[in-house]
Image (cartoon, grey):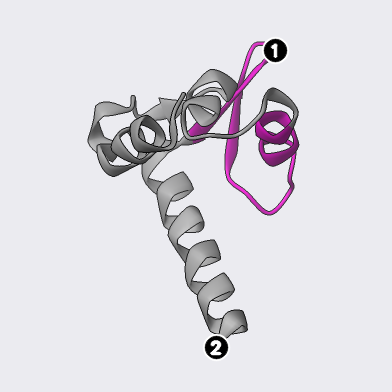
Amino acid sequence: MTATKEQEAISSRTSFPALLSAKHLQACGMTRSMAYQLLNREELPVVKIGERLFMNRDLFFEWLDNQARRCGEDAA
């Protein structure tokens, strides 16, 4: 996926389903291993359905925005 397509995918957050799988996280530009590392972090709200892991879309993007803000503050 090109950088422009990744930006479009991330900017249309409501086009993602309410529960994000590892594949949805990959559509945001993460590698498969990065997506599973994120889904296995204890501080993030993850839902396990059967053997699959999901994250609430709104909480994920809120977390992502907070990470971006923290990176911006660290750079300043």
Please, is residue 46 above or below residue 71 in the view?
above
Looking at the image, which is closer to me, 56 or 5?
A: 5
Q: Amino acid at mark 1?
A: Glu
Which contiguous range is marked in magenta?
A: 34-55
Q: Position of residue 32 (x, y in %)?
A: 68, 24
**Residue 12 placement, left or right of 39:** left
Dot 1 corresponds to which residue?
Answer: 51
Please, is residue 74 above or below residue 24 in the view?
below
Looking at the image, which is closer to me, 43 or 29?
A: 29
Query: Is 50 covered by the magenta stretch?
Result: yes
The mark lying in front, picked from 2 and 1, is 2
Dot 2 corresponds to which residue?
Answer: 76
Please, is residue 74 above or below residue 51 in the view?
below
Image point (50%, 64%), residue name: 68
Other residues around mark 2 within 10 Å, as few (<14) / some (14–19) / many (≥20): few
Quarter of the figure with the C terminus: bottom right
Secondary structure of the residue carrying numbered label 2: loop
**Residue at the extreme top of the image, as rendered:** 50
Query: Is 17 covered by the magenta stretch?
Result: no
Other residues around mark 1 within 10 Å, as few (<14) / some (14–19) / many (≥20): few
